[in-house]
Image: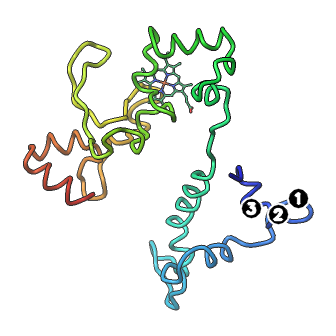
Amino acid sequence: MRTGGNGVLGDYRASDGNGLTRTYEDMVRTAFKPDWWNASTAVTINGKSYSQLEANFSLVFPLAVQLYEATLVSDKAPFDKYAEGNRNALTKQQQKGMDIFNGKGHCSNCHTGPAFSSAAMQLNNNPNERLVREFMGNDQLAVHDKGFYNIGVTRTQDDLGIGGTDPFGKPLSFSRLAQSLGSAGFASQACSTV
Ligand code: HEC
């Protein structure tokens, strides 16, 4: 597998090393279907006029980044070799660290699976299982969205994440949605939006 941006964009690198030989506009036209950029009429947003390609840039840019990131596969780290069965790939000290990670550190409660993240849904046995009911660090039973934890890295108000609402005022979190709709309402709503 080719790795990283150099492999993907290397061919378009300007000879002086600065930037690319192609414009974003050019690459968007090449990569995305015309429906997304070739309208002849302008699009007005907040009183300003844009071409369709400009107006859709905030849509196509993250899609491009997402597809690029999908090419970054980390599978040659010492841990990967160890997991494949090479018992010498990690030093004794690293193995001790891993034991703490999986044992008394409880890190693997959340950092689970090959991607070390319980939020990597496709890696779970049942990808359609969106809620989990379990005992939390305070020994209280809680139902929450699978894979997501507010661990207080930033102030909660600064980054609500799935604690926020969608443009229609509905909770982004499935557990909140379930609470607000009741289980029957939640079943119909959640299934119709998948
Ligand atoms: C309750 C769940 C939970 C537990 C337990 C947990 N983490 Fe995390 N960890 C997270 C979350 C969520 C993030 C992402 C935080 C963010 O970016 O907002 C994270 C981020 C990290 C990161 C940064 C990863 C990155 O890509 O930037 C490291 C390193 C990390 N945790 C190590 C540990 C270690 C070591 C332990 C055990 C001592 C541990 N974690 C226990 C949930 C947890």
For the point 67% across and 73% down, which residue is it?
A: 27
Image spot of residue 73 (x, y percent): 62, 45
Q: Tag count in the figure? A: 3
Q: Earlier in the sequence, mark 3 or mark 1?
A: 3
Q: Which mark identifies residue 17? A: 1
Q: Is mark 2 within 8 Å of ligand 1?
A: no
Q: Are marks 3 and 1 in contact (CB under 8 Å)?
A: no
Image spot of residue 174 (x, y percent): 25, 44
Give the secondary structure at mark 1. Answer: loop
Nearer to the camera, 104 or 53: 104
Q: Quadrant of the C terminus?
A: bottom left
Vertical order, 72 against 90 (above or below): below
- Neighbour tally class for label 3: few under 14, some 14-19, many 20 plus, Cα within 10 Å: few
Kind of residue at disc 3: Leu
- Neighbour tally class for label 1: few under 14, some 14-19, many 20 plus, Cα within 10 Å: few
Q: CA distance from mark 1 to mark 2?
A: 7 Å
Outermost residue on the bottom side: it is 40
Nearer to the camera, 61 or 153: 61
- Neighbour tally class for label 2: few under 14, some 14-19, many 20 plus, Cα within 10 Å: some
For the point 59% across and 29% down, which residue is it?
A: 84
Q: Which mark identifies residue 13? A: 2
Q: Which mark identifies residue 9? A: 3
For the point 77% across and 54% down, which residue is it?
A: 6
Give the secondary structure at mark 2. Answer: loop
Image spot of residue 60 (x, y percent): 53, 67
Q: Are marks 1 and 2 in contact (CB under 8 Å)?
A: yes
Nearer to the camera, 63 or 48: 63
Tell me if 9 is positioned left or right of 187 in this view. right
